[in-house]
Amino acid sequence: MLVVLAVLIFENLEIEALQAALVIIALYTLKAFVMFIPVMPLYIGAGMMFSVPYALLLTMIGLFCNMSIGYYLGKRYGTERVMPLLQKNKKIQKFLANSRYTGNALCFFLRFFLAPLDLPHLFFGATGLKFPYFVLFTFLGLAPRMVTFILLGETVASSFSLKFLIPFGLVTALSLVAFVTVQKLEQRK
């Protein structure tokens, strides 16, 4: 569905912009296999090259490609091959050891609090979290950081102007609302 929407929206772009969009999507896809590609410059770059709506859509398509590959690789390889990779990452290992969350809430909070993008995709594929929930809670967890850095990319020349500070405050407020909502949903279980 995202691909069809992207085709409809990007059909009005010039060839150079379309090439840039395809390169960004390709980098997100490549990131599923080459984990050392940092995601923040991709967010900022999308914000610098495209308007915010295009940058958000492009980033979501790229992230969807990235997370789908990671999820299905984790599902294919299973916990016996994925868990040793997770044990090498001290941040994830400590988070999982101290977390009281499971399932959807764990997916949200792991994405919300921790920066590594690819290892959690493998983990949730290996542990059997249903794909639609994985996608939803991954996007919800990544959204505050993603939106903030895309806005930063758009306003890189004037990052302390009201044009940046107002959306940044809005994203911070939305992050708090999302955090509290998931906390309350978890308490109801």
Image (tube, rainbow, N blue to C red):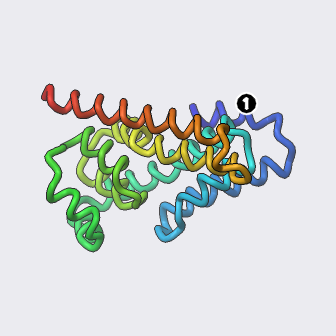
Give the residue furthest to the top: 188
Residue that appears at 34% across and 51% down: 113
User: In the image, what residue type sits under mark 1?
Assistant: Leu
- Judged left or right of residue 149, residue 187 is left
Residue that appears at 29% across and 32% down: 180
Q: Is mark 1 on a helix, strand or loop?
A: helix
Q: Position of residue 149 (x, y in %)?
A: 57, 50
Residue annotated with mark 1: 8
Q: Quadrant of the N terminus?
A: top right
Q: Position of residue 22 (x, y in %)?
A: 70, 52
As rendered, which of 38 and 26 lies closer to the eye?
38
Q: In which quarter of the image is residue 85?
A: bottom left
Q: Where is residue 139 in the image (x, y as percent from the top left)?
A: 44, 40
Q: Quadrant of the C terminus?
A: top left
As rendered, which of 112 and 172 lies closer to the eye?
172
> Considering only vertical position in the picture, is 29 above or below 138?
below
> Considering only vertical position in the picture, is 117 above or below 163?
below
Q: Position of residue 103 (x, y in %)?
A: 22, 41
Residue that appears at 73% across and 30% down: 8
Residue that appears at 67% across and 43% down: 161
Q: In which quarter of the image is residue 129?
A: top left
